[in-house]
Image (spheres, rainbow, N blue to C red):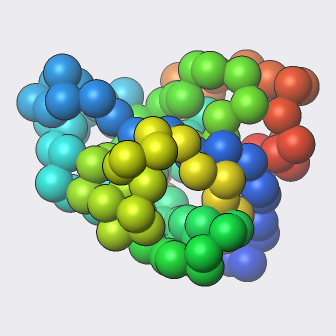
C-alpha cells in the first residue's frame, strides 16, 4: 500500500522508555533515543513523517525505523529526543497528527495488524 506525501492520520503518540536505547529496531538499526526516529505499524521503513501536537501545534519530523506501538489507540512511538521537541515528556502521551513528508524506500516488512479501536486512519 502506498502512502503518498501529505497523507495524514490523527491519534495518540507515546515515546520509548530508556530501556530500549541500544536495542535492535525492526529494520535492524540500533535504537538511539537521541535520534529523530519513530515506530509505526505499517509505514515503510525510511518514511519521514511530520508529527504535530494537536493542542499546541509543536512539530517534529522523524524517520520510521521500527514497528509499533502495540497499545490500542496509539499511532506512533517517538524517540525521547523527538518527544522532547514537542514537549510531551512530562505527559507521556499526546494527541498528534502525523503527515507523510517523504515515502520510505525500504520494504514495509514485519507489518503488525492494525487496531480498530483508534481514531486513526488505516495506516
Name above or below for residue 75 compared with residue 46: above
Q: Quadrant of the C terminus?
A: top right
Residue 92 versus residue 22 in the image, above or below: below
Classify residue 37 as left or right of residue 28: right
Q: Residue at x 53, y 29 (%)?
A: 68
- In the image, taking residue 57 as reference, residue 3 lies left or right, namely right
Q: Residue at x 69, y 68 (%)?
A: 54
Q: Position of residue 50 (x, y in %)?
A: 54, 72
Q: How many marks?
A: 0
Frontmost residue, 100 versus 34? 34
Q: Residue at x 89, y 25 (%)?
A: 116
- Residue 72 image position (x, y, % from top left): 71, 22
Q: Residue 8's image quarter?
A: bottom right
User: Looking at the image, is 86 positioned above or below residue 40?
Assistant: below
Q: Residue at x 45, y 40 (%)?
A: 92
**Residue at the left extreme?**
22
Q: Whole-percent x and y of residue 48?
A: 48, 67
Does residue 42 appear in this view?
A: no
The answer to whether residue 41 shows anywhere in this view is: yes
7 up-or-down from 117: above or below: below
Q: Quadrant of residue 108?
A: top right
Amino acid at each position: 500500500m502506498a502512502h503518498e506525501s501529505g497523507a495524514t492520520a490523527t491519534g495518540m503518540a507515546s515515546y520509548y522508555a530508556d530501556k530500549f536505547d541500544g536495542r535492535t529496531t525492526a529494520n535492524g538499526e540500533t535504537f538511539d533515543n537521541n535520534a529523530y526516529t519513530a515506530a509505526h505499524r505499517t509505514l515503510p521503513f525510511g518514511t519521514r513523517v511530520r508529527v504535530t501536537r494537536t493542542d499546541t501545534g509543536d512539530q517534529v519530523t522523524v524517520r520510521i525505523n521500527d514497528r509499533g506501538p502495540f497499545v490500542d489507540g496509539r499511532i506512533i512511538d517517538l524517540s525521547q529526543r523527538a518527544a522532547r521537541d514537542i514537549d510531551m515528556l512530562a505527559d507521556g502521551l499526546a494527541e498528534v497528527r502525523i503527515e507523510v513528508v517523504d515515502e520510505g524506500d525500504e520494504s514495509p516488512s514485519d507489518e503488525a495488524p492494525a487496531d480498530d479501536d483508534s481514531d486513526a486512519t488505516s495506516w
